Amino acid sequence: MHFVTGGAFNGKTEWVKNFYHHPGESDFDVVSACALTDPAAGLDLSQSENLMIVGMEQWVRKELTKNHADQVRSLFNERLESWSQWEKEEASRMLVIIGTDITKGIVPVDKNDRLWRDVTGWVFQDIAKRADRVDVIWYGLNQRLK
């Protein structure tokens, strides 16, 4: 599992595509994190070989409208476990999770925005702990953290 984070519109998805581009190999299936957790989406991950899950921070925001912060984190860790198991089922599979870093800068005045920021930070920590590799992308350039 590879976790990639960085600022909005800093080239995270493009960096991943370039980093993993190997002639003759399949491209990534890019899927919104919100769609992966929506049973109505009907996604069949068994057909994917290289999966890029984008928008983790938006998944957190969506789940916070329905659940308490602790429940969101617990639910996320269940999802993370299932995604990790999917990757491990086949040696050729690659899972990349991308999330926009919203934890820096001015602390939001609005209570709900602060909670979103906090829970997103906790979720990103959970991803980083389980990931084999972690990169931060700023202005299209990576810095490897793990």
Image (cartoon, rainbow, N blue to C red):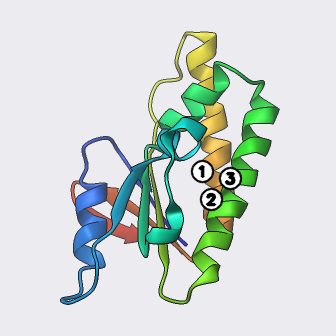
Q: Is mark 2 on a helix, strand or loop?
A: helix
The residue pinned by badge 2 equals: 127
As drawn, which residue projects farthest toward the left? 23
Please name the residue shown 22% across and 54% down the image.
139
Q: Which amino acid does label 3 sit on?
A: Arg
Q: Mark 3 sits on what residue?
A: 79
Above or below, 68 against 138 in this view is above
Residue in view at x 47 percent, y 87 percent: 92
In three-dimensional space, the C-alpha distance between marks 2 and 1, rounded to whole angstroms, equals 5 Å
Q: Residue 60: image x %, image y %?
A: 59, 34
Q: Which quadrant would residue 7 be assigned to in this image?
A: top left
Point out residue 113 in the picture as x, y percentages from the top left corner: 56, 19
Residue type at the position of mark 2:
Ile
Q: Are marks 2 and 1 in contact (CB under 8 Å)?
A: yes
Residue 103 visible in rendering: no
Mark 3 / mark 2, whichever is N-terminal:
3
Judging by the rendered image, the residue that carries numbered circle 1 is: 124
Binning the other alpha carbons within 10 Å of mark 1 as few (below 14), some (14 to 19) or many (20 upward) gives many
Q: x, y percentage for residue 75?
A: 75, 43
Write the residue at 53% across / 23% down.
107
Left/right of residue 48 with respect to residue 73 in the rendered view: left
Q: Quadrant of the C terminus?
A: bottom right
Amino acid at the residue labelled 1: Phe
